[in-house]
Structures are given as structure tokens and as C-alpha cells.
Image (spheres, rainbow, N blue to C red):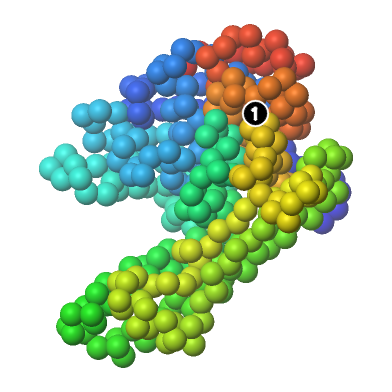
Amino acid sequence: MSIANRLLNYLMYLSSLSLEFFRSYDHRKISFQPSFNLIIGNNGTGKTNILESIYLLSACKSFRASKLSQLLKWETSYASVVGLIEKNNEPITLEAQLIVDPKYPNKPSTKRFLINSIQKTRKEFLGTLKTVVFQPDDIRLVTGSPSRRREFLDAVFLQSEWRYAQALAQYHKALKHRNELLDLIALSKAHRSELFYWDQSLVKNAEIIRTFRQQFITHVNDFWSISNHPEVQKLFLDYHQSTITTEKLTNNFNLDVSRGHTSCGPHLDDFHFQSHIFTDTPDKSLAAWGSRGQQRLSVLALKLAEINYIETKTNEKPVLLLDDIFSELDPDHQQLVIEICHDYQSIITSADGQINGLLSKNALLISP
């Protein structure tokens, strides 16, 4: 691919957004510019809902709701999010529709995804628009539970790697059935041989998941090692992989039956933020020894590596969604985020109108 064509592929941004019965909104249309967009409003006015709707168009899921039915405005059975993106000066319309049967409000919502008014499968729709989300509680990637870090890894790939999304879904399906069988075997209501199919599915899909996760961890560490920022250069991720093989499942059979769950596999993977800045101890853990500022820097560095990974793999620039993070950052880290945003379409929420003064480019001011 020529340099000229590569540059053309970068020319994509979200130009407008239309919401219908989404979260707190009945009807709302918003226009955006390709650079800085600043949504200013008090807490509780729906700023994050706007970012969440954009992420829905990107990842076909929410970054904060466990059920898509929670995205519908109260006492409605239908919601729609329509985004117009400009790619190489050609408009593309993306639409996500969520429908809940009023008779069965607790059932999963029906989802429809359309590109230019033509219904598409989730596989075909995913990744048309790419986003990276910055949130105040991202610091919990350093100090929080392993499940939060696994969710981060999953989110990196769900927008761009369909093989990963498919393998992850099949893995969790097999894991659920295997754990149910373990309980039945413990009660002598099932036979050990019934695990064979699910064991094979776990091992097969775990290898795909492991390959992508390891690839990303390696990319992050390589990216950090050549950073111009001296503190970022000292960072590295330590990947703790829970390997799963047919032999290991066989050897762990009695343990798994007694516990009622599968004791190895990528559902137990984890990674830790480390830094060579800690020279006086063999433990390089930022969670244990890092200051709040060092931990925030490591998360910002991870987001920057995620952006670079998406660009490298897809040759497209993601839209950056920043959810009221400046109030959590000191001036140096605020400036680092602004420098990151300069090269991307950035949609920023804040309750502080003074944030606009930090931006060296004129931001488009939007009310929620």
C-alpha cells in the first residue's frame, strides 16, 4: 500500500450523531468537528450517555452497562443510535437499534446493526468505527481485580479482530457447559466422558485467545520501550497466562470436580503493571509501590499503546472518547492527554468549563 493510500485511510471521523430514546434522551442530534469536541455540563445531565452511544456504534456493546436493555430510556421498548462517519470524504451511516418486548422486559434485547440502511451481522458491523475510551476509574486497571484487566484485553480486540470475538464467545460457552457438567459428575448424574467435547472446545479457542493477548502485551512493551517519556520507558506489563491443555484438564479433573469449576484457562489470565523505576526491590509492581501519579501515567501510557496498536493493525485512527478525566489529573498529565488528543478526533466530557482553556486548538462546545 502506498503512503498516499495509507494517509487516505486515516481520513475518518464521526460527523454527527442522532439519538432516539437512548438513556436520558428522547431525541437528540449532535454535530462534531474532526478535532476537539467538548461536551460541557453538570453531573447527571447525560454527558457520558453520548460517549456510550458512540461506543455502541463501535463495539456493539456498552462500556458501562451489563445489559443492552439498560440503554433504553425508561418505559420505552425501542432505542436507536445513528452515526454519520466521513471516511476518505465518503459518508457512511451506522445505526444500532435496540428493541425490548414489553411483555418480557427481562429478556435480552433484540439488536439490529445497519450500515447505510442495510442490515449487517455483528461481524460485518464491528470495527467500522473504532474508538478508545478514557474513564476516571481506568486507574483500577492497575489496582483492581484481574477480571477488569481481562475485560480491557477483550475490548481491545472486539472492535478489530473477529476471530478473537468468536473464540471468546465459544470459549465462555464451553466453560459454562463444562462447569455445569462438573457439578453433575460430582452428584453422579453425568459421566466423565461427557467432558470430552467441551474440553476440546476450550483448548482450541483458548489458543486463539492466548495468541492475541500475548501479541498485544508484546506490542505494548515494545511500544513503551521506545517512548520519549523517561518514565514510560521504564514501564512493562507482566503477563500471567493460565495455560490450558487436554493433559492439564485431565490431571486437574478431581480438583475441578471438587471445586465445581475449571481451574485453568484464559478466564484466569492476568497482567500486572511493572516499572524498572523501583531499583531497590525485586518487586516492580506499580500497584504495590507506585504513587497515584505513577499509576495514572501507566494507564495513560497503556491507552496510548492501545491507540497505536489499533492504528498499526487497521491503518485507521480511532476516535478518542474522554469521559470527565481531566478533573482526576495533575497539570502534567492533563498536558500529556492533550498532546495525545492533538492527532485524533477527540470527544471530551467535563463539568468544568475551564477545560477549554487547556486546549490549544479551538474546541467545538456542545451542551449535553
Residue 15 visible from this viewpoint: no
Residue at the front extreme, as displayed: 280
Residues 300 and 102: in front is 300
Three-letter code for the amino acid on which mark 1 is drawn: Ser
Would you call the spot at circle 1 few (<14 residues within 10 Å), some (14-19), or many (20 or more)?
many
Q: Which residue is mark 1?
A: 346
Residue 289 visible from this viewpoint: yes
The quarter of the picture where residue 20 lies is top left
> Residue at horizontal 39%, vertical 72%?
262
Direction from residue 101 to residue 86 in the image, left or right: right
Residues 63 and 191: in front is 191
> In the rendered picture of this protein, how many numbered marks are placed on residues?
1
Find residue 184 and report its horizontal and vertical position in percent. Answer: 21, 78
> Residue at horizontal 66%, vertical 12%?
356
Direction from residue 212 to residue 113 in the image, left or right: left
Find residue 194 and report its horizontal and vertical position in percent. Answer: 29, 86
Vertically, is 189 above or below 97?
Answer: below
Assign a secondary structure to mark 1. strand
Direction from residue 178 to residue 299 in the image, left or right: right
Residue at the bottom extreme, as displayed: 193
> Residue at horizontal 52%, vertical 14%?
351
Residue at the left extreme, as displayed: 103
Specify the quadrant that holds the N terminus: bottom right
Vertically, is 26 above or below 230?
Answer: above
Residues 54 and 304: in front is 304
Find residue 94 and report its horizontal and vertical position in percent. Answer: 50, 40
Residues 181 and 38: in front is 181
> Residue at horizontal 72%, vertical 20%?
331
Find residue 181 and report its horizontal and vertical position in percent. Answer: 27, 77
